[in-house]
Image: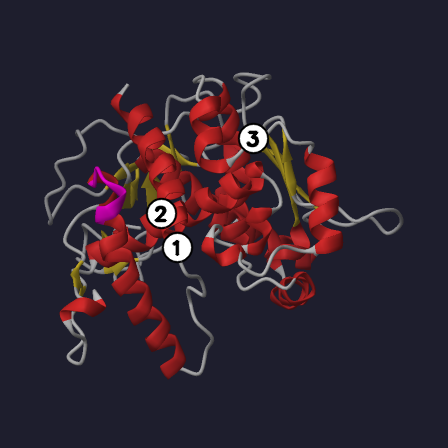
Amino acid sequence: MKLFKCTHCGQLLYFENHQCVRCHYPLGFIPEKMALVPLVKKGKDTLEPYSKGLVNKLFGPSEKYRYCENHRHGVCNWLVPAQSQDPFCKACQLNNTIPNLSKEEYHDRWRHIEAAKHRLVYTLLQLGLPFMSKDEHPEKGLEFDFLADPKKGPRVLTGHANGTITLNIAEADDIEREMARKAMGEAYRTVLGHFRHEIAHYYWDRLVADMGQEEAFREVFGDEREDYSSALKRHYEKGTSDDWNQYYISPYASAHPWEDWAETWAHYLHMLDTLETAYAFGMSIDPELASKKDNLKADVNRNPYEVKKMSGLIDMWLPLTFAMNSLNRSMGHSDLYPFIIPPVVVDKLAFVHQLCLKVRRK
């Protein structure tokens, strides 16, 4: 995530801020410009970017916006062009089902979920990846269902099917999510991680199947025509081999090529978002005790979205994660990035990277 600055007072801002913490101007994110800006009222429901003081060349004098409809629920700070007929922003247009807001705890969970989903959509926009709502394209569109477990009957399963991503809102509860992480034997489990994993299945359809890349995919990930249900059943009953970490980013990735793709894709998005943040902060990793052969020195001096080769991302990522994990341990926390990336997984990440670059070049 890049850094944002209030163009009224100069305060640095978080992507999720609804109001500047210094000057208290309301803030809005404009996805068409990838900008978070202070706003002034120009009518009952109309806003325009603050244009005095610090110069912002992104905006013309007549650009007017309004908040996404979900701003009134405190879950969205994105803007919609004033002339748009759609009440929702690019991120909220994708919602098909939201939680029952009459339940306060559900509203809190939805706010947590939307923060993660908006960060996901930001990354998709930065990558220039195609997506559309189911209203725009019923067959190839994308939608989200945020559901709670029923009082009776089976639990809601988080997953993807034909462009519909379902998320059990219990995942937004820290305690329930941690219980699930331990029960599943996972090293890492977050709401944002779920979104990044599940969106990968959507993009397998869009970038692999629709673009005729199945054979190239099979050379790297294996044959996805293996029966999916049987593969998952085998994984949950028998687990994975002891040497899984030589070939996969996680044990679950070994279950089936589709899950290998999804886990790899999720880590690719982890890398891009974190490296962009490090780049925005001008971070440099240069441990005094490390030798050249340790490969732990790195200047995060390139925007990861502009790096053409996966090796360039890896060269920045590995030193950065070693530093992040060391800082976390200093605070008494477990590793922030508890993964090892073997050479085989680097090749898989490179496949994802090149597919995304190919789409952007079109």
* Identity, as a three-letter code, of the amino acid under mark 2: Val
- Which numbered dot is residue 346? 2
Q: Are marks 2 and 1 in contact (CB under 8 Å)?
A: yes
Q: Earlier in the sequence, mark 3 or mark 1?
A: 3
Q: CA distance from mark 3 to mark 2?
A: 19 Å
On the image, the x and y values in percent for residue 182 come to 65, 67
The image quadrant that residue 339 belongs to is: bottom left
Q: CA distance from mark 2 to mark 1?
A: 6 Å
- Left/right of residue 2 with respect to residue 178 in the rendered view: left
Q: Looking at the image, which residue is at 73% across and 49% down?
A: 148
* Identity, as a three-letter code, of the amino acid under mark 1: Pro
Residue 225 is inside the magenta segment: no
Visible residue check, residue 31: no
- Left/right of residue 34 with respect to residue 111 in the rendered view: left
Q: Secondary structure at mark 2?
A: helix
Label 1, residues with CA under 10 Å away: few <14, some 14-19, many ≥20: few
Label 2, residues with CA under 10 Å away: few <14, some 14-19, many ≥20: some
The image quadrant that residue 308 belongs to is: top left
Visible residue check, residue 311: yes
Q: Is residue 93 above or below residue 159?
A: above
On the image, the x and y values in percent for residue 351 come to 37, 35
On the image, the x and y values in percent for residue 356 come to 34, 31
Tag 1 residue: 342
Residue 311 is inside the magenta segment: yes
Q: Looking at the image, which residue is at 33% across and 64% down?
A: 321
Q: Is residue 160 above or below residue 214?
A: below
Tag 3 residue: 223
- Residue stretch rendered in magenta on the structure: 307-312
**The C terminus: image quadrant:** top left
Label 3, residues with CA under 10 Å away: few <14, some 14-19, many ≥20: some
